[in-house]
Image (cartoon, rainbow, N blue to C red):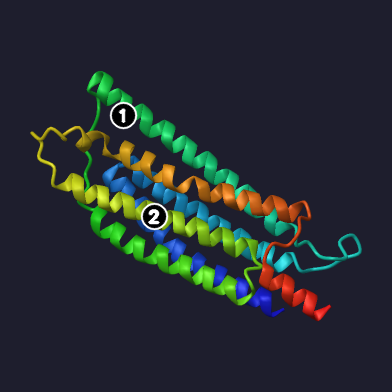
Amino acid sequence: MNQKRIEQRGLWLGILINSIMAVSGITVFLITDIEALFVDAYFTVITLVSGIVSIIISKVSSKKSQRFPDGLFVLEPIFSLCQSLLTIILLSLSVITVSVKAYRYFAFGEGQMMNVGPVLPYEMVMVCLSFMLSWFYARQNKKINNSSTMLLTETKGTLIDGIMSSGIGLAALLIFFIPVNSPLHFLLYTGDFFVTVTLIAFTIKMPFQVIKLAFIEISGGVLQNKQVQQKVEHVV
């Protein structure tokens, strides 16, 4: 099926690029110990794992049997639903983690100055890869009239990753130029708190949108894509 070939080609490229990004992210996090980088790297790992699972589901969903004469296409929105729920849980845990870290600094003066040197070149590369991959996913999905829930999920997930990388890179650049005796010196210790909370505030809407679309598809909701509707009506 041509649709499945296009879908799987997009997912395979995503696995390759996300593998590179995941290894790079974990390496830079271990060097810097910056919490926001942990969120960024862990998010990439989730995207990588989801890409592998997506390939499996993409191959299995079209197979028909006596028990499932119409195939197992419902696995696709179920997977997208689970991935989005996991994303929301991860983002929530990240807010809790950096909030505790910031509280310890402001309340007790406990904290470690961030090492932002390696962050800048890393994030520049990650931003380029994330946005290019998100564009590629969207382009592949457009070829099949945006009918792939998995490609939609990967598009939004990779876009979130790119936005997070952009914010972390910009914050690292600003923090890099803050002197130790500056009134803003507290950002040298708590900058990841402000970065993480801001990024999550801007990206938390995306997984909820995917959950809504997945739920509509699972529950047999009416098709909303007007282009596809008109094409189906014309054929019928």
Q: Secondary structure at mark 1?
A: helix
- Residue 159, percent from left and from top: 45, 59
Relative to 68, 135 lies left or right: left
Q: CA distance from mark 1 to mark 2?
A: 22 Å
| Image quadrant containing the N terminus | bottom right
Q: Using residue 13 as the reference point, say whether residue 226 is left or right of it.
A: right
Tell me which amino acid carries mark 1. Answer: Ala
Residue 67: x and y in percent read 90, 60
In this rendering, would 24 be left or right of 136?
A: left
Q: Which residue lies under the disc numbered 1?
A: 102
Q: Which mark is residue 163?
A: 2
Q: Amino acid at mark 2?
A: Ile
Report helix, strand or loop for mark 2. Answer: helix
Would you place residue 72 above or below residue 99 in this image?
Answer: below
Q: Residues within 10 Å of mark 1 (few under 14, many from 20)?
A: many
Residue in front for this viewpoint, 188 or 197: 197
Q: Is residue 168 left or right of residue 181?
A: right
